[in-house]
Image: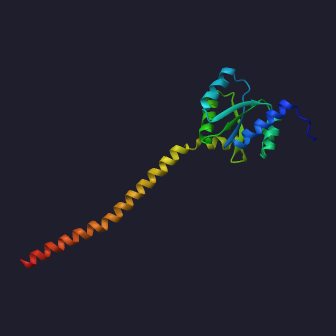
Amino acid sequence: MADKPVRADKATTVAELTEQFRGATATVLTEYRGLTVAQLKALRRSLGRETTYAVTKNTLAKRAATDAGITGLDALFTGPTALAFVSGDPVEAAKGLRDFAKTNPMLVIKGGVFEGNAISADEVRRLADLESREVLLAKLAGAMKANLSKAAALFQAPLSKTVRLAAALQEKREKTDA
C-alpha cells in the first residue's frame, strides 16, 4: 500500500502523537464507544497529571506509532480509539484504567506499549495488578532494614557472649582466690 500524502494539519497531529509515543513510559489503547463526554472527563481526571488521554483517528495514530518505531499495534487500531500516554508510573495508570472500566464497562482496554514493546489487554491487566513503585520500594526498604537489624544482632551476640564469659571467669577466679 503506497503512502498517501498527508495534509499539513494531519502531519502536525502525527508529529505530536509520534512525540507522545516516544516520550511515554507506556501507552494504553482503549475503545471508548458509548462513553459520554462527562465520563471521558472523569476518566481524564482519574488518570492524574502524569497521563494524557487523547481521542484520535486510527490512521493518524497508526502512522505515529510506526514513525515512533513501535510495531505490533496495527490490529488494535479498529473502532473508536483513544490513547492513554503515561509519563509517570505505568502501574498507576493501568490501575486507573482498569478501575474506571469496572465501573464503566463501555471502556475497553485493547492493549498497549510498555518499554517499547506491544502488549496485550491481558498484559495491561497484569500490569494493573502489580503494586505501585512506591509500595514496592517501601517493601524493599523494610526488608533491607530488617536484614540490617538481624545482622547487627548477629554481630552483637558474640560480643555479649564474650563479655558474659569474661565476667563468669572473673567471678570464678575471685571465688578460687578467696
Q: Quadrant of residue 107?
A: top right
**Residue 88 visible within the image:** yes
Asked if residue 95 lies left or right of residue 167, the reply is right
Quarter of the view holding residue 114: top right
- Residue at x-position 62% and y-position 30%: 100
Percent of width and height locating residue 29 = 72, 36
Q: In which quadrant is the N terminus drawn?
A: top right
Residue 66 x, y percent position in the rendering: 81, 43
User: Which residue is depicted at the point 52% across and 47% down?
Assistant: 136
Q: Is residue 103 left or right of residue 79?
A: left
The furthest residue to the left = 178
Q: Is residue 34 above or below residue 58?
A: above
Any part of residue 58 in sight: no
Q: Is residue 2 above or below residue 162?
A: above
Q: Position of residue 33 (x, y in %)?
A: 74, 26
Residue closest to the eye, 104 or 21: 21
Q: Position of residue 41 (x, y in %)?
A: 65, 24
Q: Taking 96 as reference, is 176 left or right?
A: left
**Residue 106 to residue 135: above or below:** above
Q: Which corner quadrant of the image does residue 131 belong to? A: top right
Q: Nearer the viewer, residue 154 or 128?
A: 154
The residue under the point 66% across, 20% down is 38
Quarter of the image that includes the C terminus: bottom left
